[in-house]
Image: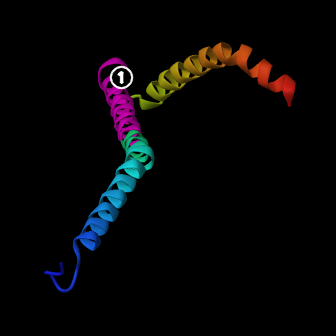
């Protein structure tokens, strides 16, 4: 029995099954490829945003520290302020270098 543009019931059923098959493949690909990539991209974006905010916060903190030390502690002698902040940065770097020592020796021995 042909009723719609000469199609039979079997042809419409075949088209419906093919459409369901394509839909299932699309859902499978989305669950296995697109969704994990979406989460990876989202983590990268939020990580970069967090890094940018941390850099801005660090710069503003150092700037505020320089202004406070210069205005209240050393009364306009900015070179002393720079010396103090440089010394603090040096001490922090030495502490980080010392903590890194055991990891540096492990990777350095294999090179």
Q: Residue at x 34, y 24 (%)?
A: 75
The answer to whether any part of residue 44 appears in the image is: no
Tell me if I can see residue 89 in this picture: yes
Residue 47 percent coordinates (x, y) = 40, 38
Q: In which quarter of the image is the N terminus?
A: bottom left
Q: Position of residue 5 (x, y in %)?
A: 17, 86
Residue 21: percent from the left, percent from the top? 36, 58
The correct choice, above or below, for 73 with respect to 60 in the image is above
Per the rendered image, the range of residues in magenta is 46-75
- On screen, 12 above or below 59? below
- Compared with 9, 41 (above or below) is above
For the point 72% across and 16% down, which residue is it? 101
Q: Name the residue under label 1.
A: 69
Q: Nearer the viewer, residue 111 or 92?
A: 111
Displayed quadrant of residue 57: top left
Q: Residue at x 63, y 17 (%)?
A: 94
Name the one closer to the observer, 51 or 14. 14
The quarter of the picture where residue 72 lies is: top left
Q: Which residue is drawn at 35% across and 33% down?
A: 63
Residue 72: say if magenta: yes
Q: Give the overall secondary structure of the magenta segment.
A: helix
The spot of residue 7 in percent (x, y) is 22, 80
SS under mark 1: helix
Q: Which image quarter holds the C terminus? A: top right
Q: Residues within 10 Å of mark 1 (few under 14, many from 20)?
A: some
């Amino acid at each position: 029995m042909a009723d719609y543009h000469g199609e039979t019931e079997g042809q419409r059923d075949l088209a419906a099954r093919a459409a369901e098959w394509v839909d299932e493949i699309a859902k499978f690909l989305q669950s296995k490829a697109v969704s994990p990539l979406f989460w990876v991209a989202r983590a990268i974006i939020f990580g970069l945003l967090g890094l940018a905010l941390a850099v801005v916060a660090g710069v503003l903190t150092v700037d505020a520290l320089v202004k406070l030390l210069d205005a209240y502690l050393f009364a306009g002698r900015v070179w002393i302020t720079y010396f103090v902040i440089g010394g603090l940065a040096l001490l922090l770097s030495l502490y980080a270098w010392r903590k890194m020592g055991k990891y540096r020796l492990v990777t350095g021995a294999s090179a």
